[in-house]
Amino acid sequence: MRLLTHNMLSSNIKGVTNGFPLRIEVEKVVEKQVDLNPDFLRSMFSKIDWKALVHAARSIGYSELPDEADPSMLDSDDFLRRFHHALLQLHLEEGALICPETGRRFPVNKGIPNMLLHEDEV
Amino acid sequence: MWYLCVFYHRLLDYRKSEVESLAQLFGAFDPEGLDQQNPKGHCSLEWRLPQHHHPDSPFHFVNLPSEDVARKIANRSILVKGMYELWGEGDSYEELEESIKSYPDERKLPYLESGSTFKINVDTFGKVLSLQDQNQRIQGLSYIPFNGRVNLKNPDHKFWLMETDDYGSNNGLPPIVQRRIFFGREIGGADRKLIPTYQLKSRTYLGPTAMDAEMAFLMANQALASPGKLVYDPFVGTGSILVAAAHFGAMTMGADIDIRVVRDGRGPDCNVWSNFKQYGLPMPIALLRADNNLPPWRPGLNEVFDAIISDPPYGVRAGGRKSGGRKLLKGAVSPYVVPDDKRTDHIPSTAPYSLVECVHDLLDLAARMIIMGGRLVFFYPVLREDDYVENQFPEHQCFKLIASSEQILSSRYSRVLLTMVKISPYTEEIADAARIKHMEFRENHLKWLEDGNLHSAVFSPADSNSNASGEGKLSKESKPKYRGKYV
């Protein structure tokens, strides 16, 4: 699971009002090479919750992202590379996503987050 | 300028809409009409048929802004056999000669120069010509001043002589009286090599309803998949649709409710990832297990996908599932509380997911998550006894239906590929209406199912004014049968 995905997901358990961002529990992180596509990064930048991304990146051991970011930084190649690396190249292979409100674990196995709810949560 | 557009004689309903989608992708339309504030979403091209031709004929004329656009469309399309600059046409070879001779020299001579190489192909529709006959016809063109040398393998210019029979025989079209002959210069043609490369029988990981490669490419073309775009499939299965989108350079993302399909596959080298690896395509950005009925997207996240392409489970070949057990949704039992020590490996129960609810959820998700001007492309089943018209298809106020193409599956069922463009933003009111509808489905779905009238309950005319699941009344008029028989 890439951090882009993490940035899009929340806990949708019935009754949970604040299910985002999910806390990351790390067992194994891998790096996968992805071709850098500046257009894609630029269009994604406006959709991303930056704080959550910075936080998530730190929790899996990458702390090269600035705390604050604004669209003007997208002109810098260095920033794009870091953004690209955090968003698409870091991969949570094994671990879990934890609902910030209830503490429910959504397991991540073989890079696939399992977001399906149990019977008592729908 | 008008070009002769010759199609492969298959998937007739898909041909023009594919060309129109690609025309939009390659900028054939005035961008003024498509700007962010006022997205018309789609413009259509001008089409014309040769004299006496049936609309299902493989020969069409299309008006395109430039040769460059025509070439790009032809090269990327799946169903265009070729785009040609027409030099002449006629009902007989005498008429053809006259027509070619009257075509302006300044358009012809640059392609006939002595330094260039050329090749003439002969093609027929509805009959077969022997090699001898073909050569005879090529020699009959000696009135055209070809100064270049012939090169059969790699010519600079390709010319085509195309002949239709008088349709006396069974070629799948209603008979017409006159034959027609066309002569033109090739501008571009489809890369059908894609199809054997990607055909399902060479795919390592397959499911029972994996999308046929040709159709998957058509869907990706309808969705305008291209580099830098993000395409999502909420019913990803083995990823067969996303493979096609990835081939055209799009970033892909998929979800499925069945964890065995998305996570495990049939082993380390036989899963959704390996299907992408097999063709050297970039891996999907994300695969996840999620329920389209209760999607896990965070609040506030909207307009992220450029397109959603999907083949939803509509219960003909594979039924859909959603979270929650039958009895649970009915309220007969209270939710089963999973003991803490069993939570990790617990397999939550699922309930049947009806077509209408599924389509409702898909449209709601798409309305929220697709960018303005982005596309939703999905299959929708129809009973062939019904004469379906456009307003029978699902509707949503954020979307405009721009293409519907039928593919006949059996004598009773066919499926229709719907292409919709997002034309207005997703508002709070729409979200609220969708939530109410969602609850209605939750409350009534089991009652309908238990009463055995699920199908009539959801397909009843009373439902047709709802925003998501318009199903019109049934009528007994049927489409011309020859289409199902031969095509």
Image (cartoon, coloured by chain):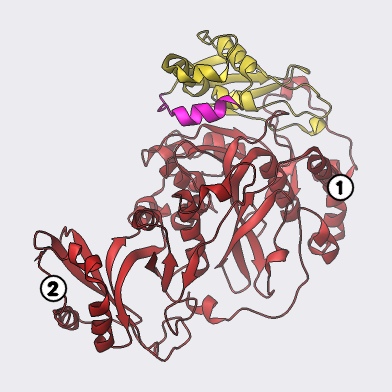
Chain colours: A yellow, B red
The spot of residue B173 in percent (x, y) is 46, 82
User: In the image, B323: left or right of B442?
Assistant: left
Chain label for disc 2: B
In this view, the residue in front, A73 or B439, is A73
Dot 2 falls on a residue whose secondary structure is loop
Q: Is residue B163 visible?
A: no
Amino acid type of disc 2? Pro
Q: Nearer the viewer, residue B8 or B140?
A: B140
Label 1, secondary structure: give it: helix
Label 2 Cα crowd, 10 Å radius (few <14 / some 14-19 / many 20+): few
Mark 2 → mark 1, Cα distance in angstroms: 73 Å
- Where residue B364 sits: x, y (%)? 72, 44
Q: Which quadrant of the figure contains the N terminus of chain B?
A: bottom left
The mark found on residue B321 in the picture is none
Figure quadrant of residue B59: bottom left
- The percent position of residue B457, horizontal first and vertical second, equals 84, 61
State the residue position of label 2: B145
Q: Which of the chains bears the disc numbered 1? A: B
Give the magenta part as a residue range: A33-46
Residue at numbered disc 1: B440
**Foreground pick, B413 / B425:** B425
Which residue is found at the position 70% from the left and 30% from the top?
A: B346
On the rendered structure, is B17 left or right of B299? left
